[in-house]
Image (cartoon, grey):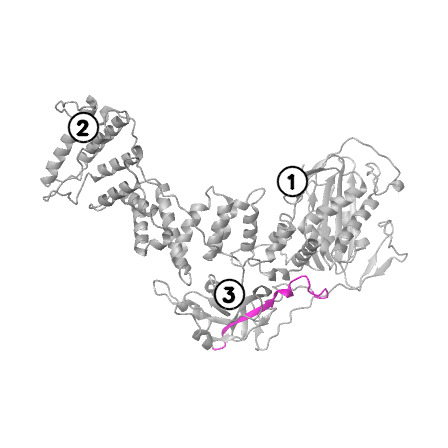
């Protein structure tokens, strides 16, 4: 049975620490492992048990196991250059309390819901006498004795069995290491004391171990009772020892030479809604070393700048601020606590801002855009810094617009356009289906059956009757003649399929009415009969009616008054099939309008799969045309993007095509579509990795509207338990990386640096 890694976040988490009345706690749910006991009994004396001994089910040496787990965790910290943890009695008592509590429950949780004074990890250390602890907790439940399956990330599962104390401790430490949310607790440099407790139930052979971590300052006296830590070689005769203080946050020291200040209420509600609407589709435009901010409609966006001290600036952040060479004495500061960290360029205020507006760029309707100048890029390698745009109101910073590195990609999306053959049910000929009016007997033609000859004759007589009425000016709109002739022609198609006549006999039957000049009249009430003959021949006699001949015939039919939508549809399909490549260069705006008009006229007349394909072709071509423009006005392309998204969102398509479509949507800055099109590729037991990675980059780009994430960084941290170390660290590296400002988050940066160190060695 495979191991399940579960995690749970606490409410109102800021980063990974939930501030309580007397401190912090980290919320992480443990590894849960199910193992069954096999036959085997061992009863050594407790004091004689060693790390290599099999665990005694009757008298287990839990103090030894706890010591070994603690040693293994310390070794993981030491690999990352962190100090070992000191055993602390308060942490041990809190860990033991929760381990014993969990023995009565099937579900593993950090919460004791029925014990208010010991509800959370923080409450429990407080209960046992902690003061000003910063606390974290890891939990594991296992069953000891028989083989079980275990897998790491997406590696194939392997069989494993745990028997000795050494094996159990090593497995617990390794399992916590392979679970990112547990590993973060181990990697916390702020943690300096701990307590590990293990509780064993001999009835079902289950073992629960809880490790409590805490960070305390230099004024705290560590409590270590010998009975709790008998194997601790560093145990001093004195009951208390002193610890050095943990690093302190450096705070947010915002400073600049331009006299800018951070607005007192950085998210002022009466202005943020306006900003949100205007900045919804904003994006940066680079022109060599100059940076411009696309803000959309000039008339609407200009309201952001109402006085001479309103403007824009750039915030330049060296990537080195967030890498693993950052001095150990300093710690990262969250963006919520310090929204401005970098170097602020010289502000561009209203007068200069408007003078350097790229206002000459307009769409086909003549709309004017506001694309103001924000500043110049520094003379540094492009991958050595991040750039944010700072919105200034009256010399105060109101908004920091983070950039992203999402990479869009144009691509060819071939659309299968098929000839519409109608819904005719040929091959089920019954004589009673056509005219039962009495007709004179007709001679049988050579090679034609009597029934076929009679049907041919009936068609000719009925057509002559209709022609006479037509030339007399009588209204044929009742379509009586058409339906009769159509029924006879269908019967002839059946006879041809049965081998009762030659197709040339059908082709010889008249369809068109002539005008006074002996040419086909523009009004042709029976033109659809000719169209059906063409389609029938195209399907059943392809050697006589190929695409070229059909196209030429349809070209003539479409010139009659009120041509059938099916004629127009097939004509356009054949036209598009034979365009020289690339297709987009051969399609004019007029042709695009014609394609859309035909698709709309055909809707309801033929199967939606035909019309949807033609519309899909139209919308892809419309998007290609817009890509040729210097800027993309979302209002002009949204309808096409929406249609493409709806065609593919729930379709059975490959994960690779979903990734390709996502990158295509990114190219148009349709980040919501790009994110949602990946859903079905990642909503499965083992997500497609490429789709999963792109989904993460979209989620953390700042360009996707998130529904109040309770813990913004949890998805990114959990991803480390699925992706390889190289794949996960690669999220922050390369030209299409996440913005490295995410490493401002302490836990995330610790995990990133730990994995970079592992890869380096």
Q: Earlier in the sequence, mark 2 or mark 1?
A: 1
Disc 2 residue crowd, few under 14, some 14–19, many 20+, Cα 10 Å? many
Q: Distance between the residues labelled 3 and 2?
A: 78 Å
* Left or right: 736 as drawn, with respect to 4: left
Q: Nearer the viewer, residue 443 or 310?
A: 443
As displayed, is residue 156 above or below residue 410? Answer: above
Q: Is mark 1 on a helix, strand or loop?
A: loop
Q: Badges 3 and 1: C-beta atoms under 8 Å apart?
A: no
> Going by the image, does 316 lie left or right of 623?
right
Disc 3 target residue: 272
Checking the image for residue 485, the label placed there is: none
Residue 394 seen in the current view: yes
Q: Residue furthest front?
A: 543
For label 3, the SS is helix
Q: Position of residue 122 (x, y in %)?
A: 72, 55
Quadrant the C terminus occupies: bottom right
Q: Is residue 120 left or right of residue 592?
A: right
Image mark for residue 456: 2
> Which stretch did the figure color magenta?
308-330
Where is mark 1, residue-wise? 156
- Residue lying at 76% horizontally and 51% vertically, measured from the top left: 73
Q: Position of residue 748 (x, y in %)?
A: 65, 57
Question: Which residue of the protein is positioned furthest toward the right in this rendering?
Answer: 237
Residue drawn at 56 percent across, 53 percent down: 696
Local packing at callout 3 (Cα closer than 10 Å; few below 14, some 14-19, many 20+) is: some
On the image, which quarter does residue 187 sit in?
Answer: bottom right
Identify which residue is drawn at 60% across, 58% down: 733
Mark 1: give few (<14), some (14-19) or many (20+) Cα within 10 Å. Answer: few
């Amino acid at each position: 049975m495979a191991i399940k890694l579960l995690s749970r976040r606490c409410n109102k988490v800021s980063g990974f620490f939930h501030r309580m009345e007397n401190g912090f706690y980290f919320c992480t749910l443990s590894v849960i492992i199910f193992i069954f006991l096999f036959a085997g009994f061992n009863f050594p004396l407790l004091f004689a048990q060693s790390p290599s001994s099999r665990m005694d089910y009757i008298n287990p040496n839990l103090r030894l196991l706890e010591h070994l787990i603690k040693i293994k965790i310390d070794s993981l910290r030491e690999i990352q250059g962190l100090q070992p943890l000191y055993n602390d009695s308060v942490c041990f008592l809190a860990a033991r309390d929760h381990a014993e509590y969990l023995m009565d429950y099937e579900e593993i949780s950090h919460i004791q819901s029925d014990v208010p004074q010991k509800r959370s990890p923080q409450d429990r250390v407080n209960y046992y006498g902690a003061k000003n602890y910063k606390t974290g907790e890891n939990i594991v439940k296992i069953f000891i004795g028989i083989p079980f399956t275990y897998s790491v990330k997406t590696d194939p599962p392997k069989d494993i069995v745990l028997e000795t104390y050494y094996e159990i401790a090593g497995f617990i430490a390794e399992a916590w290491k392979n679970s990112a949310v547990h590993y973060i607790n181990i990697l916390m440099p702020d943690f300096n004391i701990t307590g590990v407790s293990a509780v064993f139930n001999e009835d079902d052979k289950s073992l629960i171990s809880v490790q409590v971590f805490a960070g305390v300052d230099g004024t705290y006296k560590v409590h270590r009772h010998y009975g709790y830590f008998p194997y601790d070689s560093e145990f001093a005769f004195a009951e208390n020892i002193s610890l050095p203080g943990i690093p302190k946050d450096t705070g947010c020291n915002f400073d600049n030479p331009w006299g800018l200040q951070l607005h007192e209420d950085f998210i002022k509600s009466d202005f943020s809604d306006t900003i949100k609407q205007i900045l919804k589709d904003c994006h940066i435009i680079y022109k060599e070393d100059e940076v411009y901010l696309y803000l959309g409609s000039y008339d609407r966006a200009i309201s952001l700048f109402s006085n001479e001290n309103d403007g824009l600036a750039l915030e330049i952040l060296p990537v080195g601020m967030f890498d693993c060479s950052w001095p150990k004495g300093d710690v990262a500061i969250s963006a919520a606590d310090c929204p401005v960290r970098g170097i602020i360029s010289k502000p561009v205020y209203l007068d200069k801002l408007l003078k350097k507006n790229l206002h000459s760029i307009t769409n086909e309707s003549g709309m004017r855009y506001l694309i103001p100048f924000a500043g110049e890029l520094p003379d540094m390698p492009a991958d050595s810094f991040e750039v944010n745009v700072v919105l200034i109101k009256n010399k105060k910073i109101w908004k920091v617009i983070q950039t992203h590195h999402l990479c869009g990609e144009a691509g060819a999306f071939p659309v299968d356009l098929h000839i519409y053959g109608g819904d005719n049910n040929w091959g089920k000929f019954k004589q009673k289906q056509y005219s039962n009016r009495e007709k004179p007997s007709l001679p049988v033609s050579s090679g034609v059956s009597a029934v076929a000859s009679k049907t041919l004759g009936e068609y000719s007589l009925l057509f002559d009757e209709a022609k006479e009425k037509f030339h007399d000016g009588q209204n044929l709109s009742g379509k009586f003649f058409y339906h009769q002739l159509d029924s006879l022609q269908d019967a002839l198609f059946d006879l041809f399929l049965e081998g009762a006549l030659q197709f040339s006999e059908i082709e010889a039957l008249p369809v068109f009415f002539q005008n006074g000049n002996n040419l086909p009249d523009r009004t042709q009430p029976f033109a659809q009969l000719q169209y059906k003959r063409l389609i029938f021949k195209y399907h059943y006699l392809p050697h006589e009616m190929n695409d070229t001949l059909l196209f030429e015939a349809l070209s003539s039919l479409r010139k009659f008054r009120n041509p059938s939508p099916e004629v127009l549809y097939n004509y356009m399909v054949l036209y598009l099939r034979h365009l020289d490549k690339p297709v987009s260069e051969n399609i004019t705006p007029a042709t695009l309008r014609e394609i859309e008009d035909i698709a709309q006229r055909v809707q309801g007349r033929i199967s939606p799969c035909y019309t949807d394909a033609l519309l899909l072709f139209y919308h892809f071509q419309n998007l290609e045309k817009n890509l040729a423009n210097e800027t993309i006005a979302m209002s002009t392309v949204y309808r096409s993007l929406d249609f493409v998204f709806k065609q593919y969102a729930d379709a059975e398509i490959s994960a690779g095509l979903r990734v390709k479509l996502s990158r295509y949507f990114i190219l148009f800055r349709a980040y919501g579509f790009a994110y949602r099109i990946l859903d079905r590729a990642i909503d499965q037991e083992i997500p497609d990795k490429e789709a999963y990675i792109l989904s993460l980059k979209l989620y953390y780009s700042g360009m996707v509207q998130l529904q109040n994430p309770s813990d913004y960084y949890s998805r990114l941290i959990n991803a480390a338990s699925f992706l390889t170390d190289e794949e996960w660290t690669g999220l922050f590296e390369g030209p299409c990386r996440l913005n490295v400002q995410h490493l401002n988050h302490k836990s995330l940066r610790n995990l990133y640096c730990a994995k970079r160190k592992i890869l380096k060695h």
